[in-house]
Image (cartoon, rainbow, N blue to C red):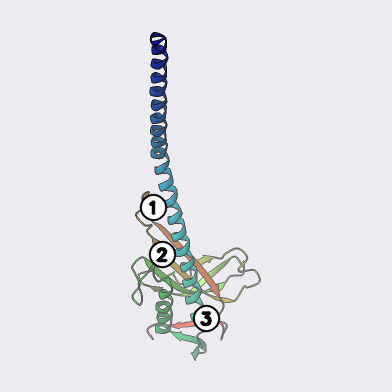
């Protein structure tokens, strides 16, 4: 009886050992799966944060461009040599005020070096697809557009507008993503808003005033 039960006991012990081994293997498999999935999950999480922050920065860029263009086009000009005119200092002030919209991506009232802006008056050409620069005022290290140079208009903007003047507000922001698990490249965010002057057909900039 004892001799007959011994092989059965051995079989049961071996079965228990195999069961424990399988259990341990399952745990190891889960650890391997976690090790494989974790980098992917961290990468997706980092990209999600990058995208959300970049979207917010781009929204601020658009709002800033809208603000500076709106401020300048609402200026009440004075007539100088028969032209409705505004001082250069007034345009500079509007650019400075508008730059504060970029907070917290840029400091205020002194903006960060990665933010540059332009205010430009353009005259819509007869082809209704381009415009000619009348004057251009840079801000915070931007490069002014050359007077007389041509600007390609957004599709449809110039339709029926030949001979009319627009103020174009431009904002450039060099966006550096957060340094999280996956590094992302630096990108330049940009937007341009066109509006017509409110109180006159055009606005002449009085340089040096």
The residue singled out by tag 2 in the image is: 173
Q: Are marks 2 and 1 in contact (CB under 8 Å)?
A: no
- Disc 3 is placed on an element classified as helix
Q: Give the position of the N terminus as an image quadrant.
A: top left
From the viewer's perspective, is 201 left or right of 6? right
Q: How many labels does the image show?
A: 3
Seen as rendered, the residue at the extreme right is: 160
- Percent x, y of residue 4: 42, 9
The residue singled out by tag 1 in the image is: 185
> What crowding class fits label 3: few (fewer than 14 Cα within 10 Å), some (14-19), or many (20 or more)?
many
Report how far apart the C-alphas of labels 1 and 3 lie in the structure: 36 Å
**Front residue (pair 149, 22):** 22
Report how far apart the C-alphas of labels 2 and 1 lie in the structure: 14 Å
Q: Are marks 2 and 3 in contact (CB under 8 Å)?
A: no
Report how far apart the C-alphas of labels 2 and 3 lie in the structure: 23 Å
Say whether disc 2 or disc 3 marks the residue closer to the N-terminus: 3
Quadrant in which residue 208 is drawn: bottom left
The residue singled out by tag 3 in the image is: 73
- Percent x, y of residue 18: 40, 22
In the image, is residue 33 above or below residue 115? above
Say whether disc 2 or disc 1 marks the residue closer to the N-terminus: 2
**Front residue (pair 193, 10):** 10
Q: Give the position of the C terminus as an image quadrant.
A: bottom left
- Disc 2 is placed on an element classified as strand
**Front residue (pair 32, 18):** 18
**Front residue (pair 122, 198):** 198
Say whether disc 1 or disc 3 marks the residue closer to the N-terminus: 3
Quadrant in which residue 24 is drawn: top left
- Residue drawn at 35 percent across, 70 percent down: 141
- Foreground mark, 1 or 3, reads 1
């Amino acid at each position: 009886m004892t001799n007959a039960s011994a092989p059965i006991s051995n079989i049961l012990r071996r079965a228990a050992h195999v069961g424990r081994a399988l259990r341990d293997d399952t745990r190891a498999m889960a650890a391997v799966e976690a090790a494989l999935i974790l980098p992917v999950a961290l990468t997706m999480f980092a990209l999600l944060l990058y995208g959300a922050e970049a979207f917010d920065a781009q929204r601020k860029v658009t709002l800033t461009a809208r603000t500076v263009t709106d401020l300048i086009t609402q200026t009440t000009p004075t007539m100088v040599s028969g032209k409705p005119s505004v001082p250069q200092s007034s345009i500079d002030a509007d650019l400075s005020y508008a730059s504060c919209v970029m907070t917290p991506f840029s400091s205020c009232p002194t903006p960060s070096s990665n933010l540059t802006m332009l205010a430009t008056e353009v005259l819509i050409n007869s082809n209704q697809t381009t415009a000619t620069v009348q004057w251009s005022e840079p801000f915070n290290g931007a490069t002014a557009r050359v007077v007389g140079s041509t600007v390609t208009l957004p599709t449809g903007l110039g339709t029926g507008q030949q001979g009319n003047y627009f103020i174009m507000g431009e904002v450039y922001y060099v966006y550096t993503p957060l340094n999280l698990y996956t590094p992302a490249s630096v990108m330049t965010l940009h937007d341009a808003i066109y509006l017509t002057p409110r109180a006159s057909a055009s606005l002449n900039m009085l340089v040096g005033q």
